[in-house]
């Protein structure tokens, strides 16, 4: 009888795990590993809903086209993979569906890897309907990729990937070795972003290959994806192999460009690039190398400049090394439309002949574009643009044919092949404008193989001999490029609900408890009084501390030496308003964590008094603030001011993207008054940013070792204007980088040295 009961128990257990003849439900690591080890073509391994931690999945089984091996969530989006986890695929016809990666990081180079090792690459494998969100390494400098392609014919589709803040592209296609070239990978129908600014290079959303494999054929297709605020760095997509195709993608308010960085013969067709009125970093397409076709693309409201201009055609380096810039040759830019874009066409971008004194010959970009055709394009401006075309170097190798511009009567430099037109636009959807009718001022130019361009960006038929621009005519309906249902998993909601902030009045007795219990977005209103703080206040959420009566609430920090009154954690966002903050000369007012800054923070200080600290702000290495904004605040009697200079690896990194200081008073700050550093000459990194205005500096810098009051070495965008510098015992107030966007004006200097502009600042090369 006992044996019969045991046998019945085993049968019942097996029945519970076997969903169908080929479906196996697994509920822990051991069952999962067993199912994977025994998997055969056609098997479906179902992961039970719940949290799976510290999970390393390796699948090397061979499925078939008609009977793949499938690993899926019991309910899409209800299987959470957390901790130190990753998936490696090294077989063929393996599908992965419905998993959600969060609250962790990969122990290897990738979260999802289309290889187990160099001997076991994936082929015909597919990952779909998955989410990877904020799955970051603990250190910004720890490099990984969220998806790494190897092998051939693999696909990522209908996935959502957002929040990557550490070094490395979100997706990397590797083609090292014969088994990974001619790969025909598909990256389609995904939702990318937002990706926050990294504060330096090596933060692309997609990178196809690398410099040293850039002459190899890839044939990767990136199509029908949404790139939403992908702001990691100047290159959203970096194409570094041959024969890649970029079709029908939407780049929405993403601070960067689609870049043909290395490699040749790309097709860039039918993409939308949408900007806004605020950011000058939102770009379009940047062209380098040979044989690309840029057709049927639509650009709207882009304000990017130079490397991030709507169309940037670069100068190259004669006999360029593989990792630098090859000359642009034999490129076609045809049937595209630019609407309300600032100086949309820029040629000779990156020319740096004037910097030959500080750069080696191998870095001088003097090779102008050759045999490049720009034809049948439309530029339309609601407000006229005095410089719709900019030549950073002479564009004598570019042929312009049958292009039109409605510049609202504003004069611009005339050129053959760009004709003033009365063409008008009408709405065709959100951010979309279509021609009321085709322009009559020119006849379409029929270039080589233009007869094949017989469909426009919307898919409607075009007669290439008659219709120009990205949209051939009036649409049958509106175009909704931001329909979120077209991209990513059908189960994941990309929009988060806006929670109304609570205003909580607090006092000296319950302040600490109220701060710990506050919800993200809450505002703590501090009543008058002295708040004695004995240990660091942790900022790991969005919180505002506001004095009920301006400067009547006084925070007195008595913590240990070298600790911070406010300790900034990843995703900590602090606003301090109208508060007096004082220390005991040995602590810091604000500081990042010394390590494990897995994401950025932000800091706003308004109308405050800060005094008697060792450091006003101490930013440690590998920490990054998206912005630090200080207004109407007085700093006095501190050994050090704002130290944002710990990224000394000279690889183009820096500690804050936007540093804004306005209407502030600095008195008796002994050193590091403002110390903001970016090391390494990396011409495509366009940061950081300092705006120092309407401030007063008195008796500061007495212990500054280099004799410079405001240190901004390597920072690209600096404005120092309308400030007063009195009795500061330094040689220089600032040393500015003239070749970059460093400016100064209307500053009063008295017994404080001078401001010097050095045109060609000598920096170590990043590459």
Image (cartoon, grey):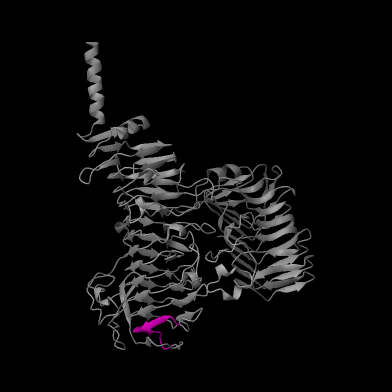
Task: Give residue 633's position: percent from left, percent from top.
Answer: 66, 61
Pick the front one: 765 or 460: 765
- Name the image quarter holding the C terminus: bottom right
Pick the front one: 730 or 510: 730
**Is residue 27 among what the camera can see?**
no
Quarter residue 288 falls in: bottom left
Pick the front one: 179 or 392: 179
Q: Is residue 382 above or below residue 232?
A: below
The residue shown at (43%, 46%) is 110
Q: Is residue 716 magenta?
A: no
Chain part drawn in magenta: 396-409
Task: Give residue 278's position: percent from left, percent from top.
Answer: 48, 69
Task: Give residue 532's position: percent from left, percent from top.
Answer: 68, 45
The residue shown at (37%, 62%) is 242
Task: Give residue 367's position: percent from left, percent from top.
Answer: 49, 75
Horizontally, residue 425 falls left or right of residue 43, namely right
- Name the image quarter holding the N terminus: top left
Horizontally, residue 87 falls left or right of residue 639, namely left
Q: Is residue 59 above or below residue 399?
A: above
Quarter residue 475 falls in: bottom left
């Amino acid at each position: 009888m006992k044996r019969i009961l045991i046998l019945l128990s085993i049968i019942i257990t097996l029945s519970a795990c076997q969903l169908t003849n080929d479906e196996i439900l697994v509920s822990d690591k051991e069952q999962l590993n067993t199912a994977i080890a025994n998997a055969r073509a056609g098997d479906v391994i179902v992961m039970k809903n719940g949290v799976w931690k510290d999970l390393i999945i390796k699948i090397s089984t061979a499925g078939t086209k008609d009977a793949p091996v499938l690993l899926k969530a019991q309910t899409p989006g209800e299987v959470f993979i957390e901790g130190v986890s990753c998936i490696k695929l090294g077989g063929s016809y393996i599908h992965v569906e419905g998993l959600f990666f969060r609250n962790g990081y990969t122990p290897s180079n990738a979260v999802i890897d289309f290889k187990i090792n160099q001997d076991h690459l994936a082929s015909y494998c597919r990952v779909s309907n998955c989410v990877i969100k904020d799955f970051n390494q603990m250190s910004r400098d720890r490099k990984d990729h969220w998806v790494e392609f190897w092998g051939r014919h693999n696909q990522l589709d209908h996935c959502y990937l957002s929040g990557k803040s550490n070094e490395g592209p979100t997706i990397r296609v590797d083609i090292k070795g014969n088994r990974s070239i001619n790969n025909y990978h598909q990256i389609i129908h995904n939702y990318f972003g937002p990706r926050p600014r990294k504060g330096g290079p090596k933060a692309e959303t997609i990178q196809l290959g690398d410099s040293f494999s850039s002459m190899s054929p890839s044939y990767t297709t990136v199509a029908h994806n949404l790139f939403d605020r992908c702001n990691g760095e100047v290159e959203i997509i970096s194409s570094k192999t041959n024969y890649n195709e970029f079709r029908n993608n939407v780049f929405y308010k993403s601070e960067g460009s689609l870049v043909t960085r290395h490699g040749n013969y790309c097709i860039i067709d039918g993409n939308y690039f949408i900007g806004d009125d605020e950011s000058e970093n939102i770009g379009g397409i940047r062209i380098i190398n040979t044989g690309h076709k840029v057709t049927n693309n639509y650009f709207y409201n882009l304000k990017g400049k130079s490397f991030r201009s709507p169309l940037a055609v670069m100068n190259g380096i004669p006999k360029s090394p593989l990792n630098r810039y090859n000359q642009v040759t034999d490129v076609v830019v045809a049937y595209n439309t630019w609407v309300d874009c600032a100086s949309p066409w820029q040629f000779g971008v990156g020319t740096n002949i004037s910097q030959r004194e500080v750069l080696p010959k191998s870095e001088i970009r003097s090779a102008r574009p050759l045999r490049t055709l720009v034809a049948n394009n439309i530029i339309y401006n609601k407000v006229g643009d005095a410089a719709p075309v900019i030549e950073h170097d002479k564009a004598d190798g570019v042929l312009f044919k049958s292009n039109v511009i409605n510049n609202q009567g504003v004069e611009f430099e005339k050129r053959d092949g760009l004709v003033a037109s009365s063409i008008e636009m009408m709405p065709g959807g959100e951010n979309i404008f279509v021609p009321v009718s085709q322009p009559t001022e020119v006849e379409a130019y029929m270039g080589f193989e233009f007869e094949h361009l017989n469909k426009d960006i919307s898919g409607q038929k075009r007669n290439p001999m008659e219709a120009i621009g990205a949209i051939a005519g009036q649409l049958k309906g509106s175009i909704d490029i931001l329909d979120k249902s077209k991209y990513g998993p059908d189960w994941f909601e990309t929009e988060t609900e806006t929670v109304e902030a609570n205003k909580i009045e607090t006092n000296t007795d319950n302040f600490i408890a109220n701060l710990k219990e506050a919800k993200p977005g809450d505002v703590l209103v501090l009543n008058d009084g002295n708040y004695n703080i004995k240990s660091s206040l942790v900022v790991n959420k969005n919180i505002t501390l506001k004095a009920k009566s301006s400067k009547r609430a006084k925070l007195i920090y008595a913590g240990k030496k070298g600790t911070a009154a406010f300790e900034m954690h990843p995703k900590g966002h602090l606003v301090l308003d109208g508060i007096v903050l004082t220390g005991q000369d040995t602590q810091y007012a604000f500081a990042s964590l010394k390590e494990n800054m897995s994401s950025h923070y932000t800091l706003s200080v308004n109308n405050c008094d800060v005094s008697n600290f060792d450091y006003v702000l101490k930013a440690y290495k590998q920490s990054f603030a998206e912005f630090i904004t200080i207004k109407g605040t007085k700093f006095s009697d501190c050994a050090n001011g704002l130290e944002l200079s710990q990224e000394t690896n000279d690889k183009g990194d820096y500690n804050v993207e936007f540093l804004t200081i306005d209407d502030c008073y600095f008195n008796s700050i002994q050193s590091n008054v403002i110390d903001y550093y970016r090391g390494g000459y990396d011409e495509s990194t366009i940061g950081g940013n300092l705006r120092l205005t309407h401030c007063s500096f008195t008796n500061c810098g007495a212990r500054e070792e280099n004799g410079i009051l405001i240190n901004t070495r390597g920072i690209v965008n600096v404005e120092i204007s309308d400030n007063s510098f009195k009795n500061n015992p330094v040689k220089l107030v600032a040393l500015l980088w003239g070749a970059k966007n460093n400016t100064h004006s209307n500053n009063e200097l008295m017994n404080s040295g001078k401001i010097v502009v050095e045109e060609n600042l000598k920096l170590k090369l990043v590459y």
